[in-house]
Image (spheres, grey):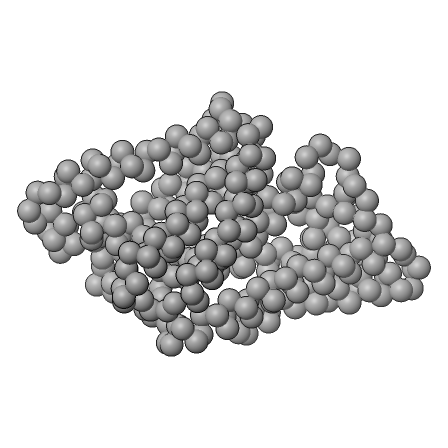
Amino acid sequence: MWLFVLLLSPFVVLVAVAIWHGTHLSAHIAWRQSGEAGSLSTAILVAMWNYMGWDNASTVAREVDNPRRNYPRAMIASTVLVTVTYVIPLASMAYAGVSAGSFSTGSWADVARTMAGPWLGFAIVVGGTLTSVGMFNALTMSYARLPMVLAEDGMLPGALARKNHRGVPWFAVVACAVAWALALRFSFERLISLDLILYGSSLILEFIALVVLRLREPALERPFRAGSLVSACMIGAVPTALILYADFSSRREHMAHMPALLLGSLIAACGPLFYLFSKRASRRPGTVAAAAD
């Protein structure tokens, strides 16, 4: 909680300085279109990317006290908090007369240096760095458990189930780190497109599984339950429509000398093939148990 307060404090200062600038310099709100083609589509994709990832918490559901009560509260509170931390700084920039069209990667630090001095720009850069490290640490914890569990179920090579003496799936962590490192050569916008294609496709499968399991396995043991069957269907309807829109919008993005949509489809298609290969390999008795030991 103290780290949360520390990381947000530079933006609190920036908001106060921006309001002072807007009040004393008689600035007016200057939101205007940047004139770039596809800017609305890009804004929707970035907004989706910023608000995606809530299902990652499900991988540690059994480690949460009373998830049926605490999960909805945490989701609602986090959504409100994330929205407020986006809206207030952007509104203060508009009030100070900063054009939305002039914003790009690194603009928060530039605006802070211009309005308050180098010290505030440096504080925002440091805060952004610490935030990225914290997010990466949390995502590593959630993502690394997925190949570990799949390996324990015989759906991936048994080596991914290996753990150290602290229970950390170290082999899965290393495998995920290598895959992430291969993505460093792509731009932020292209990574967003690819991420929405792959991650969005997995979310659609999760929504489908949610409804199917309600019908086929109504008595299945669950750490928590998200409402009725109608609620389960409604939960996935709007996000699925947005994900399909994101896939359609990324058809013009190119990665690795091919459209991002095609690259994402090829990567996704490797999943079922790898699953069949791993399923055959796991039929050998003792394979997974030996790897886990």
- Identify which residue is drawn at 32% across, 33% down: 270
Picture coordinates of residue 82, whole percent (x, y): 60, 62
User: Do we see residue 10 in this rendering?
Assistant: no
Toward the viewer: 284 or 187?
284
Spot the residue most to the left: 285
Spot the residue most to the top: 257
Task: Please tell me in which quadrant of the rendered image residue 199 appears.
Answer: top left
- Identify which residue is drawn at 44% across, 67% down: 227
Left or right: residue 6 versus residue 96 is left
- Identify which residue is drawn at 73% across, 46% down: 103
Task: Please tell me in which quadrant of the rendered image residue 142 appears.
Answer: bottom left
Picture coordinates of residue 106, whole percent (x, y): 66, 47
- Quadrant, the C terminus: bottom left
Toward the viewer: 98 or 245?
245
Toward the viewer: 209 or 132?
209
Asked if 70 appears above or below 289 in the picture, the reply is: below
Asked if 74 appears above or below 190 in the picture, the reply is: below
Total marks shown come to: 0
Picture coordinates of residue 289, whole percent (x, y): 12, 53
User: Do we see residue 162 in this rendering?
Assistant: yes
Left or right: residue 147 versus residue 94 is left
Left or right: residue 180 versus residue 95 is left
Picture coordinates of residue 266, whole percent (x, y): 39, 30
